[in-house]
Amino acid sequence: MVISLLVVTQQESPGGISTQGMILALVLTIITSSSLGAIVQGFFSRSRLKGETLKLIEDAAAGAIESVSKQAGRVEAANDRLTVRVEHLEEERRAWLAEREEWRSAMRRHREWDIKVMTVLNEVSPDHAVPAPPPLHPANGTLH
């Protein structure tokens, strides 16, 4: 079971667990389950009657199916939790991007106003020239 869970976590895609990952996990779970020994023993034991062998195989298969069903339920629940978390993070990201754009717009308007005021002051009083305003953004220019 541990092997199959590792395979499932390695096969995850952004939308959830891939079909290939789920199939591989189910196959590995069946192969690694203890019921495999019972199936092999049932096929190769010549001293048992046919009915006992079939019952043994049915019991082993039922155990494997139950195990796989439980694991599939846990994987589905984990996938649902991750989907909700991703949706929440996407909402936060969209809000952050919108706020960042508002700040960029405000910085551009402020810069334009600074230049207009500087131009007017320099026209009114050429003897006392006002230098250009300092930049309102980081030196790397990410807010342009």
Image: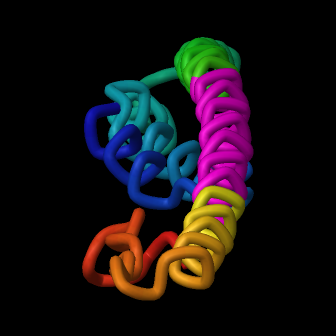
Secondary structure mainly formed by the magenta segment: helix
* Label total for image: 0
Q: Quadrant of the C terminus?
A: bottom right
Percent of width and height locating residue 28 = 44, 49
Percent of width and height locating residue 88 = 66, 25
Viewer-side residue, 14 vs 30? 14
| Residue 101 part of the magenta segment | yes
Viewer-side residue, 86 vs 26? 86
Viewer-side residue, 87 vs 36? 87
Q: What is the quadrant of residue 12 in the picture?
A: bottom right
Colour scheme of the picture: rainbow
| Residue 104 part of the magenta segment | yes
Residue for point 42% across, 47% down = 9
Residue for point 50% across, 70% down = 143
Percent of width and height locating residue 29 = 45, 38
Percent of width and height locating residue 23 = 65, 54
Residue for point 61% across, 57% down = 110
Q: Is residue 3 left or right of residue 22?
A: left
The correct choice, above or below, for 67 with respect to 138 in the image is: above
**Is residue 112 at least partly visible in the picture?**
yes
Q: What is the quadrant of residue 98 in the picture?
A: top right
Q: Is residue 74 left or right of residue 131?
A: right
**Is residue 22 at least partly visible in the picture?**
no
The correct choice, above or below, for 22 with respect to 67 in the image is: below
Q: In the image, which residues are magenta?
A: 82-108
Q: Is residue 62 left or right of residue 64?
A: right
